[in-house]
Amino acid sequence: MRNVRRLTAASFSSGLETTDLGALATGAIGRVLGLGGSIASFAFIPPGFVRCETCGEYNGSTDEGNLDLGKEHQRTGKIVTVSCLCHGIPCQYCGKLKHRPISTSYAPETNAIWHTPYFAGMFGCPECEAKRRAER
């Protein structure tokens, strides 16, 4: 799959987000345009993805070829399905929703698909995990 970022056990449990040059570039462009570091309102959203009115993330399915920016969108036959935070599971410590294990979500800022691994359900949300580490 193209443009898929996978979380590792270390990055998930520490609550750290992976930063790449694409995210840095979109932040810089957003600051130049006066958007406070975000160009999400100008981001290309692949056909088939619909923004959730409750959490602001995306639901839906699209062909993987629709994720290639700057190229002609050619069908690959591989369907990518994403779900929003509303379809997530509650944190075992505070009850706040987190992404469902073995699911994918879409990041419009980087035009990337994020995969949440199966072991994500064994951890709390990033805030609760940070508190638990501080208590140790």
Image (cartoon, rainbow, N blue to C red):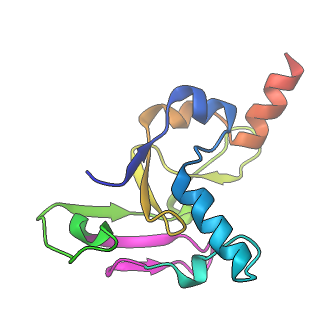
Query: In the rendered image, which quarter is residue 92 located in?
Result: top right
Residue 18, image x and y in percent?
58, 43
Q: How many marks?
A: 0
Relative side of 5 to 29, left or right: left
Q: Which residue lies most toward the front here?
A: 32
Residue lying at 50% horizontally and 65% vertically, measured from the top left: 84
**Bounds of the magenta span?**
45-62
Quarter the C terminus occupies: top right
Relative side of 65 to 37, left or right: left
Q: Tell me if residue 1 is in the magenta stretch.
A: no
Query: In the rendered image, which quarter is residue 3 located in?
Result: bottom left
Residue 66, image x and y in percent?
27, 72
Q: Which residue lies most toward the top here?
A: 136
Residue 29, image x and y in percent?
63, 73
Residue lying at 30% horizontally and 67% vertically, measured from the top left: 68
Residue 26, image x and y in percent?
59, 67
Relative height, residue 1 to residue 43 (above, below): above
Relative height, residue 6 to residue 41 (above, below): above
Relative side of 67 to 18, left or right: left
> Is 72 or 3 nearer to us in this picture?
72
Residue lying at 67% horizontally and 37% vertically, measured from the top left: 124
> Is 113 or 58 nearer to us in this picture?
113
Q: Which residue lies most toward the right here?
A: 135
